[in-house]
Amino acid sequence: GAVVSQHPSWVICKSGTSVKIECRSLDFQATTMFWYRQFPKQSLMLMATSNEGSKATYEQGVEKDKFLINHASLTLSTLTVTSAHPEDSSFYICSAGDFQAFFGQGTRLTVV
Amino acid sequence: AQSVTQPDIHITVSEGASLELRCNYSYGATPYLFWYVQSPGQGLQLLLKYFSGDTLVQGIKGFEAEFKRSQSSFNLRKPSVHWSDAAEYFCAVGAEGGGADGLTFGKGTHLIIQP
């Protein structure tokens, strides 16, 4: 079946650096992908909607200059956490597919 | 604005016993409803979804859910749980158009299976 793949599965970075997370649809085209953030033992919070060929739509309270989203092709969306700080440490998950049927395996970001 | 409530943070069930996880939603129009399962450190897997039609929905891994509009509920059930069902379960609601907008998730229910 259809699969959404995220890379990397986990990353540790130094405070002040930037980190890029990739979300790929492996066997289908996705004009829209979604990025969620999950704090430990918490629910998923929608961060933004990634639209192929146009600007992402950010949820209220999400800093678009900090969380840069690029959806340059029908199979790839990237989330770049710029100038990362420890409070950005979290689990980031993307989704795609009809009715968001498919989620990536998530990326654990730790900022030290 | 839409919202989802999962009243039970933790539920403990004996292996082989039946299971019901509760979900209540708030949405002004016809909701699109989902149940997902998440194993530790993993992404989410879709168990089942409801858009319209038969209010009893069958999903994967032997799960089913029933949509009750009068109660604004979409409870997840399984007649006999297995140890491998231990995980975090999330109920989610989407706007009509089902997936064109992001989903709103409940806080999740942690399922513990006793031997």
Image (tube, coloured by chain):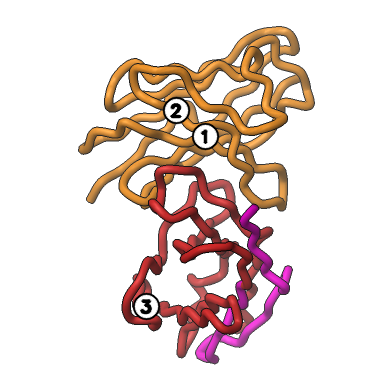
Chain colours: A orange, B red
Residue B36: x and y in percent read 49, 61
Q: Amino acid at mark 3?
A: Val
| Residue for badge 2 | A50
Q: Quadrant of the C terminus of chain B?
A: bottom right
Q: Amino acid at mark 1?
A: Trp
Q: Does the magenta run of residues contain B8?
A: yes
Q: Which residues are magenta?
A: B1-23
Residue A46: x and y in percent read 59, 40
Q: Does the magenta run of residues contain B88?
A: no
Q: Subunit of mark 2?
A: A
Which residue occupies 53% across, 90% down? B18
- Ranked by sequence position, the earlier of labels 2 and 1 is 1
Near mark 3 (Cα within 10 A), the count class, few <14, some 14-19 or many ≥20, is some
Tag 2–tag 1 contact (CB < 8 Å): yes
Name the residue furthest front: B28
3D distance between C-alphas at marks 3 and 1? 27 Å
Q: Subunit of mark 1?
A: A
Residue B27: x and y in percent read 58, 62
3D distance between C-alphas at marks 2 and 3? 30 Å
3D distance between C-alphas at marks 2 and 1? 7 Å
Does residue A27 appear to the left or right of B70 in the view shown?
left
B54 shown above or below A28: below
| Residue for badge 3 | B57
Q: Amino acid at mark 2?
A: Ser
* Residue B34 seen in the figure: no
| Residue for badge 1 | A35
